[in-house]
Amino acid sequence: MQSNKNITKFYLQGDKSIAIRSLILCLYFKGKHKIKNLPNSDDIKSTLYVFDKIGMDYQLLKNSLFIDSTNIKFNEIEIDCNESGTTARLLIGFFSGININCKIIGRKTLRKRPMDRVIFPLLDAGVNIQSKDNLLPVNIFKSKKLKTINATLIIPSAQIKSSLILYAMSRNGKSIISGNIKTRDHLERMLLDLKYPIKVGKDRIEIVGNKNKSNNININLPGDISSASFLICAALLSKESSIIIKDVCLNRYRMGFLESVIKMGGNIKINNKRNVHGENIGDIHASYTGNLKGITIDKINIPSLIDEIPVISILCLYSNGKTTFKNVEELRVKESDRIKAIIENIKLMNGNAKEIGNDLIIYGNKKLYNTTISDFNDHRIFMSFYIANKIINKNYRFDNNVDCYKKSFPDFLECIDRIIK
Ligand code: S3P
């Protein structure tokens, strides 16, 4: 590691997953809430749109949001989630629970993303929910048959788990969610911190509905580990660079990127670890590493780095040997089919990658060339290959019409320019 004076320091905008959950919880809890370090990314704007639709009393001062939800009422509503899959899936659960007529719509990439994963368990709970081919738009109709949830999760997805928890919060009685629950647990942690009656076991969550309705949320959102992963990748690949990213969310179910990159030999240290309102946070120090090595990432570890596979792919290109990501079928239903998008861009750069079934395999250390990115309208594909191109040629320019990175990381370009100079 280098001496302090050469280290570039970053503070990142708040974590997208936690931000979306805190905004939706303000719809449930009646009180005066404060959310600090709210990101100004497109997905958060799409979530804030619900507040406008229901006439929520709120004020955004710089990046602090002040909300008064004491008098909110829900009527029939139509919500446009734009391109935010998390917003759409979580709101489907939430609005099903409070039992109003509601239509959830989306645009571009979101219209192609499957909603059956939340629709089916909600149908089982008696929700009157309709959609064509289980895609958006989804219509929810008031129902007299709503029950509590008793669901076993097959897909390890935090969106499904959170959607069902948000549904259960508005139903009288105890709901049970079991099966694949070892995914990001921000909502569970926030609820525990707010003293909400939720029990989180090893493979089972129990939650009692319609409790603690009066509550004030007061949260300072930790930096987004998914955004941090792009800066870490740029630092590891850029000669002489050394960065520190302060106050990043280190939720145990989102540690897969850091753990894998450390296994690859990446020069990474985590300092100043602490727990704030139930979430682990810390500072990440990363610096140039010239001798990364390929690894195998097993199925069990995939949920903990599901969003970081595109950016790890770039590190793989600069590693010795091959890297295998096992059973990454969930990548096919993100903003793009990320397996295809990663392989296509790697090939355009003269690299070597392939898919075998649902495994993704990337070979390191080939001579790479600049290319025009095929971004598939996918923020993480664009950001990953932007870094790969910029590492090859610092003057790399891209088509200025691209703005998909603003979905999750509006400051991306400025931050990368501070690392790859
Ligand atoms: C998210 C969960 C993940 C992730 C997405 C955000 C969340 O999706 O890919 O970017 O905030 O719950 P899945 O639940 O589909 O794995």
Image: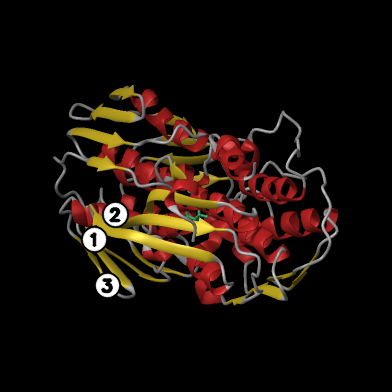
Quadrant including the C terminus: top right
Count of numbered tags: 3
Return the mark for residue 38: none
Q: Could you tell which of marks 1 and 3 lies nearer the N-terminus?
A: 3
* Amino acid type, callout 2: Ala
Q: Residue at x 69, y 55 (%)?
A: 337
Along the line of sight, the residue nearer the viewer: 181 or 73 = 181
Q: Nearer the viewer, mark 3 or mark 2?
A: 3
Q: Which residue is mark 3?
A: 201
Task: Give the quarter of the image for residue 125.
Answer: bottom left
State the separation of the CA atoms marked 2 and 1: 7 Å
Separation (CA) of disc 1 from disc 3: 11 Å
Q: Earlier in the sequence, mark 2 or mark 1?
A: 2
Q: What colour scheme has been applied to the protein in the rendered image?
A: secondary structure
Q: Are marks 1 and 3 in contact (CB under 8 Å)?
A: no
Q: Nearer the viewer, residue 173 or 89?
A: 89
- Is residue 304 visible from the viewing direction of this image? no
Q: Are marks 2 and 1 in contact (CB under 8 Å)?
A: yes
The amino acid type of the residue labelled 3 equals Gly
Residue at mark 1: 207
